[in-house]
Image (cartoon, helix red, strand yellow):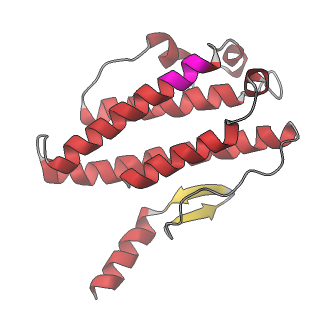
Amino acid sequence: MRHEYELARQYTLSLYDGLDESTIMWRPSYQGSSIGWHLGHQAAVNHHALRNWINRDGSINPAFDRIFDAATDEIGRAFLPPLAEIVAYREIVAARTLERIDEILSGDCRAPDQMRRIAVTMLAGLINHEYQHDCWVGEVRQALGHGDPPNPLSTNPCLLNCDGYWVMDLTLAQERAETARS
């Protein structure tokens, strides 16, 4: 799952890499969100999930906590920080996430067996959230004439397209593991 998390983040990068900042900050309507907002929102949700599930690490940027919260009215999503700051935020969040996951995988945490199970579920949720917003980023790209988005980089058979969204299906993974044990 750690590797799948990194592949999901690389896929997100592929969707905005090469676009100029004005394109990334363009909003399809006053009620719509820009690619830039989705990039910040993905990181904010990742940060909050990690902080709340693992009970570590304070806020990276309280202003970003508010701006990129899904509860922020769409009209308020027009006033974003520069792309470089959003990307830097994403990288800090990802580095913290990987650091915490590595601590869990090495057993350097309380209740290591329990935390490993939590980490798998948490990473699946973060991956699925990343892909959920990647779908919307792809739609904005299409609206701007940048063509259909590519498929994700992962070849994991548990990554499937469900209702138009890419999803890491843990139920499918569990069923395959049980079949392999039989």
**Vertical side of 62 occupied by 136: above or below:** below
Can you name the residue that lies furthest to the right here? 145
Which of the image's four quarters has the N terminus?
bottom left
Q: Which of 147 and 53 is in front in this view?
A: 147
Q: Which of 123 and 23 is in front in this view?
A: 23
Residue 129 in sight from this viewpoint: no
Residue 122 image position (x, y, % from top left): 36, 46
Q: Residue at x 60, y 31 (%)?
A: 39
**Vertical side of 53 occupied by 1: above or below:** below
Q: Is residue 85 found inside the magenta-colored segment of the image?
A: yes
Which of the image's four quarters has the C terminus?
bottom left
Q: Residue at x 42, y 67 (%)?
A: 171
**Vertical side of 162 occupied by 119: above or below:** above
Residue 135 in sight from this viewpoint: yes
Residue 4 image position (x, y, % from top left): 45, 54
* Chain part drawn in magenta: 84-88
Residue 22 image position (x, y, % from top left): 78, 21
